[in-house]
Each structure stands twice: as C-alpha cells, then as structure tokens.
Image: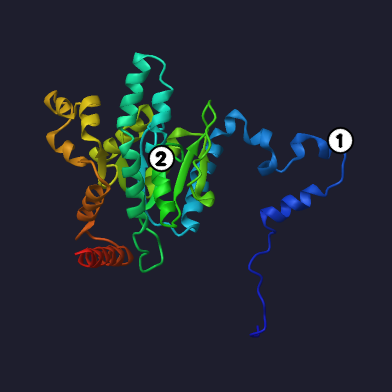
C-alpha cells in the first residue's frame, strides 16, 4: 500500500442518511403500514409501554452528551421554590391577597424574596470561576429551569455573560423555561428520577433555598447519598436557617437516634452569597483534584485576593 492509499473512516451510512433515504421510498400498501417505518423514526413504537427502558436510556444519555459537548466539567446546582417572588414582583403578590390567610402567606413569601437576590448573586460569583487548564468550565450554574429562585440562579449567570443550565420537567400545568437559561443548555425531562440524577452527576456544590415538596425531594436525596457513601461529599448550603429550623428539626432526628450527630456536618447554613462561596472554596482548598481543576482553584483565589487588595 502506498502513502496515497485512502482508507474510508466508515462503510455504513450514518443514521441521518438512512432516515433521509427512507423518505424517498416507493408507496405501496406494505411501505405505508407503520410496521415498515425505521424503528428510530416510529414514534408510536417508541412510546409503547414496553419501550420505557429505552426511553429511560435516551433521557439519561441526551443531557450527558449535551453537557459534555458544551465543555462543562462541573456544576453548581441551586434548588428552591418556584413561588418566592423576585423583589420587583413582591408588591404584586401582596396585592393579589384577598383575605387574612392569603395575605399572611403572601407576606411570608415576600419576606423570603431577599433570597432571590442572594441566588442571583451566587449565580454571578460561581459563573466567573475560570476555566481549567483543559479549557473546561467548573461550577456552571444549574437550576430546575423554572421561575423564582431557579430563575434568579440562571439570571446571575446571564448578568456576567456566562451560560447556565436549566433542567425542566413536563408537568400537568404549563411550565416553560425561564428566559435566562442558555437555549442550548435548556433540557426537558419526563422522568423525575433521571432529572434528579442529572442534577447530581456533575454537581460539585449545591445550594438549597427555601422550597416545598420538590426542593425537599431533591435535597434529601442528596443528603441520603452522601450519608450512605453512595457519592463523595460536596458542599451543601442551606439558605435561610430560620426557615430550615422551622420546617425540619434536624437535631430532633439526632435525638431520636435515627441519624447520627455527624450527619449534621453534611450541610452548612448560609445567608449571603459570599458566605456560601467561601464555604465552597474552603471545602476544595487542599483537596486532591485533577491538574486543571487545581489550576482553576488557585487562579480563582489569586484573582479574588487581587480584587480585595484593589478594593482596599
């Protein structure tokens, strides 16, 4: 064989080519029957009940490919209520109250609107973490893609011109991604279980703001995974200690003997974005990392120190 010999990289046509070729076939009673469709183009077939394992696999694979192709090595996940208003919408929430009960609830939600600004600022800070030596991005903001606290997190990334992820889910009531999610990183899920898995696959820090059933479900799954050693510990930030102390008596779980005292060390209470980011930095300082990640952490700390010197 000579140097001019060209060996083809593949001999089978790509699936996209086959799909295009199938469109131009002849029309007969046989080819018009759904049974003749290519399996991967037959939606009736893919939506059969016994194809659920295949749909699971596709929903697991697609987000992984999208995130990897975007050059994202790790994420900063932010959970929180879809009902807490932004400060600019707080008055409208109060005005909508029609009786004493609804007004009391509205006032409680408005009091928590400060966490919208905190989540937004935390999103800004995390999004400015420098790329590592391999050009990969770390602590990319990842939210549920919805309104309120989720919107605030994505909005913080957008404030500094950085991309962020939104993991939306199909719900009985209409829900659209918030406008600050990067379109190419706006993903939709059918299965809650797979969505929760994707929240944590790349997570290297997580912040949970006041929220309801969804926030509790997502947070307690993470706490369980860390407690049982199914995943390595990551910084877990609980924002709003007054809220968490009221709705979950963690110490009572210790006193009842159903968790250990050391399990309370899995998470940290926070109030400000700066406080939370400091906990994340302290957690990873001196830990064993890949070369690229270590370079990025060192660069971030040097940049932060230089900014502090300038401020003084």
Q: Percent from the top left, x then y, of residue 237?
A: 26, 42
Up-down: is 286 above or below 7? above
Residue at 43% x, 35% y: name it: 193
Residue at 40% x, 43% y: name it: 152
The residue tagged 1 is: 29
Q: What is the number of the mark on residue 163? A: none
Residue contact at pointers 2 and 1, CB within 8 angstroms: no
Q: In the visual, does 91 lie left or right of 290? A: right
> Which comes sooner in the sequence, label 2 or label 1?
1
Q: Percent from the top left, x then y, of residue 57?
A: 51, 42
Residue at 31% x, 44% y: name it: 118
SS class, disc 2: helix
Can residue 143 be seen in the rendering of this structure?
yes
Crowd tier of the residue under label 2, counting other residues whose Cα lies within 10 Å: few below 14, some 14–19, many 20 or above: many
Quarter of the image where one finds residue 192: top left
Q: In the visual, does 12 lie left or right of 135? A: right
Quarter of the image where one finds residue 150: top left
The residue tagged 2 is: 150
Q: What is the CA distance from the residue labelled 2 to the residue labelled 1?
A: 51 Å
């Amino acid at each position: 064989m000579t140097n001019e010999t060209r060996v083809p990289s593949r001999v089978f046509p790509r699936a996209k080519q086959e799909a295009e070729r199938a469109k131009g076939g002849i029309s007969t009673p046989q080819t018009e029957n759904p049974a003749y469709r290519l399996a991967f183009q037959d939606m009736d077939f893919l939506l059969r009940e016994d194809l659920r394992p295949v749909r699971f696999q596709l929903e697991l694979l697609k987000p992984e490919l999208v995130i990897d192709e975007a050059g994202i090595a790790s994420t900063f996940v932010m959970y929180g209520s879809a009902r807490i208003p932004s400060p600019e919408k707080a008055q409208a929430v109060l005005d909508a109250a029609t009786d004493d009960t609804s007004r009391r609830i509205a006032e409680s939600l408005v009091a928590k609107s400060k966490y919208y600004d905190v989540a937004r600022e935390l999103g800004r800070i995390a999004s400015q973490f420098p790329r590592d030596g391999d050009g990969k991005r770390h602590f990319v903001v990842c939210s549920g893609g919805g309104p309120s606290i989720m919107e605030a997190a994505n909005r913080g990334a957008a404030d500094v011109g950085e991309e962020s992820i939104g993991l939306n889910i199909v719900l009985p009531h209409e829900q659209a991604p918030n406008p600050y999610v990067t379109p190419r990183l706006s993903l939709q899920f059918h299965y809650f279980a797979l969505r929760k898995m994707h929240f944590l696959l790349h997570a290297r820090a997580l912040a949970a703001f006041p929220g309801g059933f969804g926030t509790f479900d997502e947070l307690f799954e993470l706490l369980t995974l860390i407690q049982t050693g199914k995943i390595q510990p990551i910084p877990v930030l609980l924002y709003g200690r007054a809220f968490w102390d009221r709705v979950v008596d963690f110490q009572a779980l210790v006193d009842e003997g159903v968790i250990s005292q050391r399990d309370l060390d899995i998470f940290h209470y926070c109030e400000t974005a700066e406080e939370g980011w400091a906990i994340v930095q302290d957690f990873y300082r001196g830990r064993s990392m890949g070369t690229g990640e270590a370079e990025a952490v060192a660069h971030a700390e040097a940049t932060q120190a230089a900014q502090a010197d300038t401020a003084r």
